[in-house]
Amino acid sequence: MPNFKVAAALAVAGVMALSGCKIIKTPTAEEAAEAASGGFNPNRMVAEIWDTKVLSYLDRKAGPFTEVAALAGSDPQAAGAKYGHKEKQGSAPWTFAARLSGTIVKAETKSRSAYVEVDADADGKADARVQIGPAIRGTAIRDSLDFVNFNEFKNQIEWAQFGKAFNTHVNGLVLEKLPRDGLVGKKLDAVGAYPLPAKGQLPMFVPARLTVGG
């Protein structure tokens, strides 16, 4: 009987101890990284503004690619004032928002930095190179937006991570679904952004919306 009383007391104590415990969920890798960085989560930041701010801004700001490119070639400042944006600090080039429509005349889909080249004026020659990922060079989408700026971030590293997050987001949302075979000859329609290219170079267009068909 004494042994029974002891066992019962231990069981009650165990239940009481368990009732006072709080089960803590193991954080995901992303949550752990966010905690380690003091709450900075660029992927979440981009996702939160993508539909309500980014796409609506690009739809409003973008001009037809042929018009934007022609004006940028003759008067970059005028093109920037109408279709573009650049940070006031530093010597960054203008980044332009544009609507690109045309025929795919070349497709390079074997590398991670895949792209297609598009004829926008029906002369049979490429007028723009559209990056289709998964690796996207540059930060054109971030740099085209006038409602984000470097001063809102702790340092250059966070600013760079924020720019990369736009590329990650558009790849997962749009580009991963894009077929990779038989692209040449098809019609492409896109809304996105590109930085002012060096003379003689094709614009490196990053799409925020993209459809291929026909």
Image (spheres, rainbow, N blue to C red):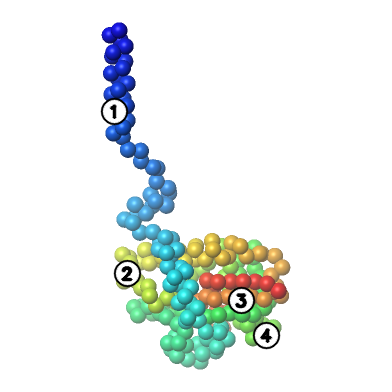
Q: Quadrant of the C terminus?
A: bottom right
The quarter of the picture where residue 1 lies is: top left
- For the residue marked with disc 1, what is the amino acid? Met
Q: Classify mark 2: helix, strand or loop.
A: helix
Q: CA distance from mark 1 to mark 4?
A: 78 Å
Q: CA distance from mark 4 to mark 3?
A: 14 Å
Q: CA distance from mark 3 to mark 2?
A: 33 Å
**Residue found farthest to the bottom:** 74
Q: Earlier in the sequence, mark 1 or mark 4?
A: 1
The quarter of the picture where residue 80 lies is: bottom left
Give yes or no for contact between labels 4 and 3 (Cβ–Cβ under 8 Å): no
Q: Earlier in the sequence, mark 1 or mark 3?
A: 1
Give yes or no for contact between labels 2 and 1 (Cβ–Cβ under 8 Å): no
Label 3: how many Cα within 10 Å (few below 14, some 14–19, many 20+): some
Q: Classify mark 1: helix, strand or loop.
A: helix
- Name the residue beneath numbered marker 4: 122
How far from the left and from the top, in percent, is residue 195? Answer: 49, 78
Q: Earlier in the sequence, mark 2 or mark 4?
A: 4
Q: Mark 2 against mark 1, which lies toward the viewer? A: 1
Q: CA distance from mark 1 to mark 3?
A: 65 Å
Give yes or no for contact between labels 2 and 4 (Cβ–Cβ under 8 Å): no
Q: Which mark is residue 152?
A: 2
Q: CA distance from mark 2 to mark 1?
A: 49 Å
- Name the residue beneath numbered marker 3: 189
Q: Earlier in the sequence, mark 3 or mark 2?
A: 2
